[in-house]
Image (tube, coloured by chain):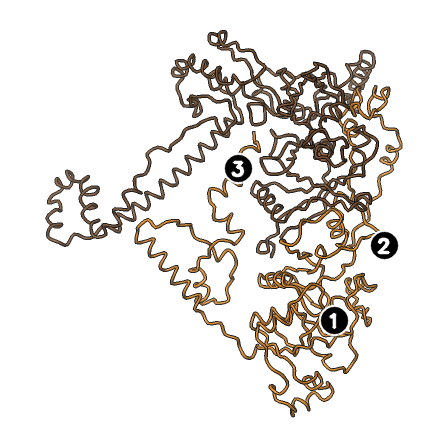
């Protein structure tokens, strides 16, 4: 059973301490020293210049206000967004690549756009690589995950070992029979000295093996099972982290390897790892230089989805996308047309409908972005978007958004246009995943307007209507009291 | 840094470590019958059979050859046999006798979908509005089984006396059951359904001579009718949706499951609008402030907005609020109460059919409190998930209850 609630997601409360500090540029030198709320202070790649607050009990603060105000009036700071990042359209991956490291950091820190090409989300391949080669310990989320997985594995293994021990103990206790026969009585130690000598044999070898004979068939099956592994079989490979392939398992993941070993292992490791990501298409191979110098070149780039790209270009104006074939900056119009066309399988469809997937998804993305949420693709949870308050570094996603089109307009009614039929099984399976991941499932209906002549995105998007429904499972045996 | 990419959140992790409680919430795990036996045989026989008392044991996936495990398994098996061999008995004094009269109230007016005038008053407690056709939740047309009134606890939320009928008409003083109520009681063993051979006048003689008729009954029981089997009861009471005097199998299954799990269930009636405090008026200074023109950006007004251009006009911003305001394009749904004429009528199956109450609230079946849950019954195999209009109509049919933020 499902409970559906009418819900409208308002703007999330942003913490007050996350207000920017007079738009001062951040120092990206030592990221682990900066608190998260300072590092990720800007919710969008736009700086604000708030006036200093005026305290009535401190008349001097008025001068401060006036001074800042007149300063901004006389020598205004550059119009925001002052930095326009550069991206390249990649038709092969259907995404926009950003290569400039400062742009990559800025787009990630100011609104959590994109994903590192070698990383799970935050572009931190370089940090991982540096950690791997022993150039300073850095806390990278992927490594934390690896460590947690390992701990969990260890814990499970420990639990299994204890269970096995308990079973073994009960089995020994059950197998023990009071020595009554003549052979057993003779085998008993005669003195304390004997006991000391044969103490091991008595507990481990003699009594156990001889008395276990009556139920020998049990014993035979035991032996195979009782061989508990002495060490859990860990191979920490980066394969499931979408790391670049590296042939050597990381010696540093446990953090216990002494420094000498690391230094010894450095030169072959760096050579190996530099060869590994040679599939990066656009970085020239400079292997000879790097083998000698410990400096690692950041080969990672940021990938922006179509929705993120269009939001940055059309909404904020903080990104320019160049076409690789012409080398020119693509206009918003061109991008809009291109992205919409990509939604169609034979992409040369002449008449584009108002319900093409890009438009629907973008309407939802834009809607939640304009309310201050941070939407990120939710494919790993089987939904369309995940909504973060503030960003993924602060908290887990609060909501999982599933987008559905709705055709309530009379235009669609007269044509008998039906929305896609989704089964309840489909919904329940998605909802079940969200319940397990402790996310609130939100179904977002996008009301599709009838087609029009206007083609500019602003007036098109104004015609879409969005409605959110929060859904949750209702369990009869849980709701009684 | 908590990342969602990490496969398990802390809470989910603890659940994964100790899988029993997480699974137990669904109740789809095997029961530990040893706990049941202690409930059955213990001195406090009617003790709390709460979910706490019946805890599931640890999972044992394979035999590891210890006698302790075998003993546990054997005792559990014995307990299961003991529980299953328990003889259920129906106390003859509790047995009810129900007579199937499908057409007795066929000419009664159907339940109205609108909220009757007096409903709000009756909710408030002055239960005087008792018009002939305005008794809510009576569903007289659908009541097909008549029983003698009874004081048993089963009837606190079951059956109604058809008060809208004329005085002294036969069967007026009896308790009449809806099909799902009758079928549930039959399945439970509380009720015997009888097929009447003679008319209702013979079975329920007129009220004025009640004592006299009790003394000298004209007919023996078996001259009046024949008892029906459970299969016959199903055949008579289960039908298609909307059939008078019957209920669809899906709805009956939902009903009986909810009743068995301890809820009180009645058929849904239109609910009076929930009373909510009117919105507090805005302070004067807020209103004055709203008159001031919004300065959305100090230097941004120079640039006219373009359909293609960046929505956020380049300029100097003092805060993020004007930036997000400029970005807001897509229309949002703002919930608001609609006048009754504009409210769309919900269509089956996305229509509230049952009202459900928790069992721990005082309950009067003729004047139930506002329900704890409202339920629509949908066949998951025959229908797909609701469209926007269906969901909208369904939600509009429930009382308007704004959230605290307004």
Disc 2 is placed on an element classified as helix
Which sits earlier in the primary sequence, circle 2 or circle 1? 1
Q: Residue at x 78, y 35 (%)?
A: B330
For the residues carrying marks 3 and 1, which lies nearer the camera in this image? 1
Q: From the image, tell me which residue sits under label 2.
A: B341
Q: Which chain carries label 1?
A: B
**Rendering quarter of residue A410:** top right
Chain A tint in image: brown
Disc 3 is placed on an element classified as loop
Q: Position of residue A408 (x, y in %)?
A: 78, 45
Q: In the displayed structure, does residue B86 sit left or right of residue B133?
A: left
Which sits earlier in the primary sequence, circle 3 or circle 2? 3
Question: In the rendered structure, are the residues bearing label 3 and label 2 in contact, judged by CB atoms less than 8 Å apart?
Answer: no
Q: From the image, tell me which residue sits under label 3.
A: B8
**Rendering quarter of residue B36:** bottom left
Question: In the rendered structure, are the residues bearing label 3 and label 1 in contact, judged by CB atoms less than 8 Å apart?
Answer: no
Disc 1 is placed on an element classified as helix
For the residues carrying marks 3 and 2, which lies nearer the camera in this image? 2
The one of A315 and B53 positioned closer to us in this rendering:
A315
**Rendering quarter of residue B148:** bottom right
Q: From the image, tell me which residue sits under label 1.
A: B141
């Amino acid at each position: 059973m499902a409970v559906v609630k009418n819900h409208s997601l308002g703007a999330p409360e942003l913490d007050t301490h996350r207000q920017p500090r007079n738009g001062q540029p951040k120092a990206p030198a030592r990221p682990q020293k900066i608190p998260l709320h300072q590092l990720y202070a800007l919710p969008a790649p736009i700086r604000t210049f708030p006036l200093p607050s005026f305290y009535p009990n401190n008349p001097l603060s008025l001068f401060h206000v006036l001074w800042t105000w007149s300063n901004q009036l006389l020598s205004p700071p550059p119009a925001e967004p002052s930095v326009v990042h550069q991206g390249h359209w990649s038709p092969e991956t259907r995404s926009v690549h950003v290569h400039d490291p400062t742009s990559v950091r800025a787009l990630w820190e100011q609104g959590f756009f994109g994903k590192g090409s070698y990383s799970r989300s935050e572009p931190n391949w370089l940090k991982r690589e540096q950690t791997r080669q022993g150039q300073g310990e850095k806390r990278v989320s992927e490594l934390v995950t690896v460590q947690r997985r390992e701990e969990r594995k260890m814990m499970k293994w420990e639990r299994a070992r204890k269970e096995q021990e308990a079973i073994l103990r009960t089995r020994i206790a059950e197998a023990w029979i009071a020595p009554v026969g003549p052979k057993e009585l003779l085998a008993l130690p005669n003195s304390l000295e004997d006991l000391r000598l044969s103490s091991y044999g008595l507990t481990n070898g003699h009594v156990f093996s001889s008395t276990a004979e009556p139920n020998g068939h049990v014993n035979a099956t035991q032996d195979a099972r009782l061989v508990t592994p002495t060490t859990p079989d860990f191979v920490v490979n980066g394969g499931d982290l979408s790391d670049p392939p590296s042939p050597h398992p990381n010696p540093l993941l446990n953090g216990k390897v002494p420094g000498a070993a690391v230094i010894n292992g450095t030169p072959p490791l760096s050579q190996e790892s530099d060869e590994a990501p040679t599939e990066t298409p656009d970085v020239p191979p400079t292997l000879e230089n790097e083998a000698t110098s410990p400096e690692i070149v950041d080969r990672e780039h940021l990938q922006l989805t179509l929705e993120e790209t269009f939001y940055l270009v059309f909404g904020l104006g903080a990104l320019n996308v160049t076409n690789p074939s012409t080398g020119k900056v693509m206009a918003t119009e061109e991008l809009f047309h291109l992205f919409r066309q990509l939604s169609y399988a034979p992409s040369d469809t002449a008449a584009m409908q108002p319900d093409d997937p890009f438009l629907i998804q973008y309407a939802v993305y834009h809607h939640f972005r304009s309310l201050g949420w941070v939407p990120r693709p939710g494919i790993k949870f089987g939904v369309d978007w995940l909504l973060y308050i503030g960003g993924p570094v602060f908290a887990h996603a609060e909501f999982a958004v599933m987008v559905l089109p709705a055709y309530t307009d009379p235009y669609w009614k007269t044509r008998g246009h039906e929305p896609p039929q989704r089964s309840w099984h489909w919904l329940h399976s998605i909802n079940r995943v969200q319940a397990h991941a402790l996310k609130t499932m939100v179904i977002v209906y996008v009301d599709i307007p009838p087609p029009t002549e206007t083609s500019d995105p602003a007036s098109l998007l104004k015609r879409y209507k969005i409605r959110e429904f929060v859904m949750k499972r209702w369990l009869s045996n849980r709701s009684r009291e | 840094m908590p990342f969602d990419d990490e496969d398990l959140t802390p809470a989910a992790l603890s659940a994964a470590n100790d899988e029993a409680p997480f699974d137990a919430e669904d109740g789809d795990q095997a029961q530990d019958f040893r706990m049941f036996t202690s409930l059955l045989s213990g001195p406090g026989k009617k003790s709390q059979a709460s979910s706490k008392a019946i805890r599931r044991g640890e999972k044992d996936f394979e035999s590891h050859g210890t006698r302790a495990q075998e003993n546990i398994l054997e005792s559990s098996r014995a307990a299961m046999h003991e529980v299953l061999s328990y003889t259920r008995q129906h106390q003859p004094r509790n047995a009810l006798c129900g007579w199937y009269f499908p057409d007795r109230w066929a000419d009664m007016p159907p339940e109205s979908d609108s909220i009757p005038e007096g409903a709000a008053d009756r909710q408030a407690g002055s239960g005087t509005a008792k018009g002939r056709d305005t008794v809510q939740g009576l569903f007289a047309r659908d009541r097909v089984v008549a029983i003698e009134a009874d004081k048993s606890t089963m009837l606190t939320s079951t059956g109604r006396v058809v008060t809208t009928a004329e005085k002294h008409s036969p069967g007026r003083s009896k308790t009449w059951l809806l099909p799902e109520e009758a079928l549930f009681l039959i399945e439970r063993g509380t009720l015997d359904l009888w097929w009447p051979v003679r008319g209702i006048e013979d079975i329920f003689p007129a009220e004025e001579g009640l004592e006299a008729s009790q003394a000298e009954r004209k007919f023996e029981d078996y001259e009046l009718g024949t008892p029906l089997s459970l299969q016959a009861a199903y055949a008579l009471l289960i039908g298609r949706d909307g059939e008078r005097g019957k209920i669809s199998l899906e709805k009956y299954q939902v009903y009986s499951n909810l009743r068995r799990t301890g809820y009180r269930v009645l058929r849904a009636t239109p609910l009076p609008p929930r009373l909510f405090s009117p919105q507090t008026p805005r302070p004067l200074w807020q209103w004055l402030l709203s008159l001031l023109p919004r300065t959305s950006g100090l230097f941004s007004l120079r640039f006219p907005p373009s359909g293609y251009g960046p929505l956020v006009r380049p300029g100097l911003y003092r805060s993020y609020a004007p930036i997000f305001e400029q970005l807001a394009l897509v229309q949002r749904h703002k919930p608001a109460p609609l006048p009754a004429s504009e409210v769309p009528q919900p269509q089956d199956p996305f229509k509230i059919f049952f009202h459900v109450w928790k069992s721990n609230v005082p309950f009067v079946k003729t004047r139930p409190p506002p329900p704890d849950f409202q339920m629509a019954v949908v066949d998951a195999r025959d229908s797909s998930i609701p469209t926007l209009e269906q969901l909208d109509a369904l939600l509009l049919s429930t009382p308007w209850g704004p959230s605290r933020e307004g």
